Structure formats: C-alpha cells, structure tokens
Amino acid sequence: MSKPTLCVLYGSQTGTAQDTAQRIARQAQRRKLQVQVLPLDSYNVANLISESLVVFVCATTGQGDPPDNMKNFWRFVFRKSLPVGSLSRLDCAILGLGDSSYPKFNFVAKKLHKRLLQLGASVLLPVGLYPLDLTQHVMCGCILLPPTYTFHFLDDVKETTDDRLRIPTEQTVPSQSRPFPCRLVSNRRVTDVSHFQDVRHIEFDITGSSIEFAAGDVVMMRPCNASEDVEQFCQLLRLDPDARFTLRPTDHNAGVFPARLPQPCTVRHLMESYLDISAVPRRSFFELLSTFATNELERDKLVEFSSAAGQDELLSYCNRPRRTTLEVLADFPHTTAELKADYLLDLFPEIQPRSFSIASSLQAHPRRLQILVAVVHYKTKMYKPRKGLCSSWLASLDPAQGEVHVPLWVKKGTLKFPKEKDTPVIMVGPGTGVAPFRSALQERIAEGKYANILFFGCRSESKDFYFRSEWDEMMKAGHLTLFTAFSRDQEDKVYVQHRVRENAGLLWDLIANKSACFYIAGNAKEMPDAVCDALKEAFQKEGGVSAEDAEQMLATMERSGQLQSETWS
C-alpha cells in the first residue's frame, strides 16, 4: 500500500506562512505521509484537478492582497472559465495567517476558501480530520527527520563573484527572481545629529535597469547579514566561510530548489546573502533544534520552548528581548556543536525582501530612485542594542568608500492617485510616512495638478522636519498647502489628527463638494485610526451628519478608493 500523499501549498510575504507550511509538513512526515511543500506560484496549478489532499497556508498583504508568491495562482483560480466541479476530487484545508488589527484580516484565506468550494472541493472539518492508517505508528517528535537537501563540499577553493551584482546583458524588467544591481549615489542623514533617530535619504541610479515607477509604488530589496555576524556564525558551527558546496535534494518531492543560491556556492555567500541568522527565531526553530540535542539540560529547555505549555517562557526568553537566532545558538553550545551543515536550510529561513515606499518621481529626478529610511536601533534587556537588518545594512553602505550596488526591483503599490487634473488630494503622512507623498507631489506638480494638501507631523521642527525646503518651494509656487504638527515642540503634544480636526471646514468642503481623495501613510499603531476619527468628527461638525452616517461615509470612501491608506507595523 502506497503512502498517502499530502501537498502543502503556501502564499507567504514575510516567511511566517512558509514556516507554518513547513511545520505542517514535518508533522505529516511523522505520520508517514508523503509530503510536498511548495509556494503556490511554483506549483503547476493544472495538477490541482488530480490532487486528493492539499493544505493551503495563506497570508494577506496590503489591503487584502495575495502575497507575491501566489499572485499567478490567484489569477488562475479566479478565472471565470474554470468549470464548476473541476476540483471535485480534492479534499483540502485552508489556514489563514494575518494581523487582526488590519481591516482586511485574513481576506485571502476567506476568499480562497469560498472559491475552492465553488469549484467543487471538499473542505475538511475544522479539526482537520483526514482518514489515516491508524495501524501506522506516529514517529516520535524527538527523532530527526531527513534534511531537505544534502551539502556536498568541493575540494577546490576558488574565487567566486557575487551573481547578484552582475549587470544583466538582456533587457528585462527587474523582478524578485532577477533584481537589477543599482548604483548607490548618496546616503545622507536627514535628522539632526542630536536627534535620537537616524533617518536616511538614499538615492540610487537606475540607468539601464528598465525600472519604471509611479507615485505610490514600492521598491524591494534583500539585505545582507553583517560581516561580524557571519564570522560568529561560522565559528559557532565550525564552518569554513570559503568552502564551496553543491546542494542535492534528498527526495524528489523536496520542493523548489533554492533558485537564489548559485551552484556551486560558498558558505560565506550562503550566510551573508541567504540565511536569516539575525531574526528572532520562531517556535519551529526550537522544535527542530531540540532533535539535535544530546545534552539533557539543553534538550529539556528546547523541548519546553517548542511546546504549547512553554510559550510564555519562550516569549520571555526570545520575543520580548528580541533575542536573535545567532544569540540562541550561543546560549545552547552543546546542541550547536551537534548541528550538521545538511540541516542549515531547514533550520534557518531565507532572508525576506524588504519594501520601501519610493520617495521620488521620475518626472522630477530622471534615472533616479530615492527612499527615506528610519534606521531601526533600540534597547531591550539584552546587552547589545537591537538593530533592524535592512535599515542597518543600508545605513552602513557608503558610496564615498567605493562603488556600491544594491539589487532592486519595483512593485506596484496600494496607493493610487487620481488622473483628473482638478481632483484635490489630501495627504496625511507623519514621519517617514511622508515618503510616498513626496513622490506624488513631484509627479502631480510636473503634470500641472496643484490642488495638494499635506499634513506632516514629526517630533521637532529643528530635528526631523523632512524635505522642509522642498515644501517651502512648493508653497511659494502655490502648488501645496501644508499643515504641520511638531509633537514635542510645546508642552502639550500635537499630532496630525489634531491638525485634521482644526481644519474640519476645509476638509469637508474639499471632500463633499470637490470629491477630494484622502490618503494616510505611516505607522499602523494608533495614527490611522486617530486620523479617521478626526475626519468623522469633521463630517459631523461641518456636514451636520450623525455619527452613524459619518461612519458610513468613510466606509463608502474606502470602498470607492476615495480614502486609501498604506500603513506598516
């Protein structure tokens, strides 16, 4: 009797859904199922009609959008030409991962669930029951499963070049699989040296890249690990950074081969550009690490951290202090010494791409792309300050020390600006949230669209008032109306929502009588809700509508695209 086959397909933007899919696969392997794990866009969707059991693990991005690695699948599965009943052989389960603070919470999983039912699939019971051979023994969680790939080290050590920095010879639009190495032109701090926050205005030369973008679009990049972290990692695992290896899958169902890794590859390249060794590890990391442990004390602690009962302990040890994977390895020296190179790709996730709102327009800065980056640096109970991987890496790049190239690609953003010349635009962008609005203002002014209102907020007029001289020029030319909120420059804190409330009459007139579009960008914590509340108050005060009607007006604006937001946590 052949083993039952399970296909685990995932759509993941930050790696959480991928990690969950791999955990499900390991549990299935322990139950003697044959398992295939793939991102949805790497799966041949035509095979879905012949699958018997599939688990879909899906995240939701942006304003209810599918992750990048399931967009092709998404377009296919929602084709109107697909016949009803085409998936009648399929038993499936859908697991959605998301943040409940977002309005489109788990939208992708809910919509996929509904569509699969339309196509005739049978969705498993909520408890996820599936008929298994109950005579089969479930493999103990302490037993080490085979690695996904085996490392085959080569005897020769040769000089290797970083393929990421090779200029493509053929003209193709840069993408996640084929980014373009853009030259870093400038990397300038735009906050006062006395200010606690280091914010950078960074410019890239995109000449010859075929990169095009519009206001609201985002640029994507993958950071590299710090050289000192790579060195420590190699020492802990007793690996020669210059050693070269090739990878071989241990099973024909191993899934997608790591396309970003050259064959052969150096250990240094793997550690520097591929494995995320500075992230806060997930529970699944401790689960897998515990299977290597021979030291009883370390094994007991790792098992506790990977158990349901030990999650409070794990939170205190790892998540609250933001302890990194590298620091965890140093805390468990006996287990770390037992690690085999073959398991590196199972233990450590791939470095995920980071996105930044583009802060410039090609109409104002041809062949250039600019971003505004807040360098993440903060203290926890850990001795060393915590650093953001990408922002710290970007801040370290200095074009004055020699030519620097960063592989980039551009993605369509969620913010869409009106094409009509006379439609006013109201933008609320405190802090680095102003980045997409700088791009929009440059683009709109170049197109002769002068009905622009910007609400900008920061801590201090003298320390973190980004692009001040540019706003002054736009105001003098009559192309911009600017309202500012400097929260720490007076005794009572003043934020952008206070300025929105103060200008209720203007905003009501622009929205109710001139169909103005309203945009919010910035930190998702409290600001977006506070601004929306202030806007609803303006509708009630100036429009004389009830609280319920004001709520309904806002919802209608959101549905029609008259109200748009781009927020991040």
Image: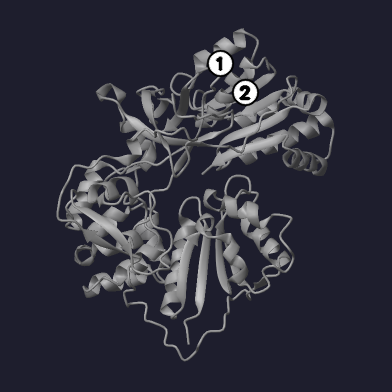
Q: Nearer the viewer, residue 290 or 448?
A: 448
**Rendering colour mode:** one colour
Quick one: SS at disc 2?
Answer: strand
Q: Is residue 196 above or below residue 16?
A: above
Q: Residue drawn at (21%, 73%), measured in percent from left and top?
A: 295
Tell whether 35 sits left or right of 322.
right
CB under 8 Å between discs 2 and 1: yes
Q: Residue at x 40, y 27 (%)?
A: 200
Count of all numbered marks drawn on residues in the image:
2
| Labels 2 and 1: the sequence-earlier one | 2
Rendered view: 550 above or below 209: below
Helix, strand or loop under label 1: helix
Q: Residue 524's quadrant in the figure?
A: top right
Residue density around tag 1, few if under 14, some if 14–19, many if 20 or more, within 10 Å: some
- What residue is pinned by disc 2? 454
Residue 550: % across, % down: 79, 39
Taking depth in this image into account, of 201 and 34 the one nearest to the observer is: 34
Q: Is residue 488 visible?
A: yes
> Which residue occupies the extreme front position in the image?
170
**Residue 496 point in image, percent of width and height:** 60, 29
Residue 492 seen anywhere in this rendered image of the structure:
no
Residue at the outermost top position: 476
Classify 75 as above or below 127: above
Amino acid carrying label 1: it is Trp
Q: Residues within 10 Å of mark 2 (few under 14, many from 20)?
A: many
Identify residue type, mark 2: Leu
Task: Provide residue 74's location: percent of width, then percent of height.
Answer: 62, 54
Q: Is residue 159 above or below residue 364?
A: below
Frontmost residue, 486 versus 17: 17
The residue sitting at 28% across, 21% down in the picture is 400
Residue on which disc 1 sits: 471
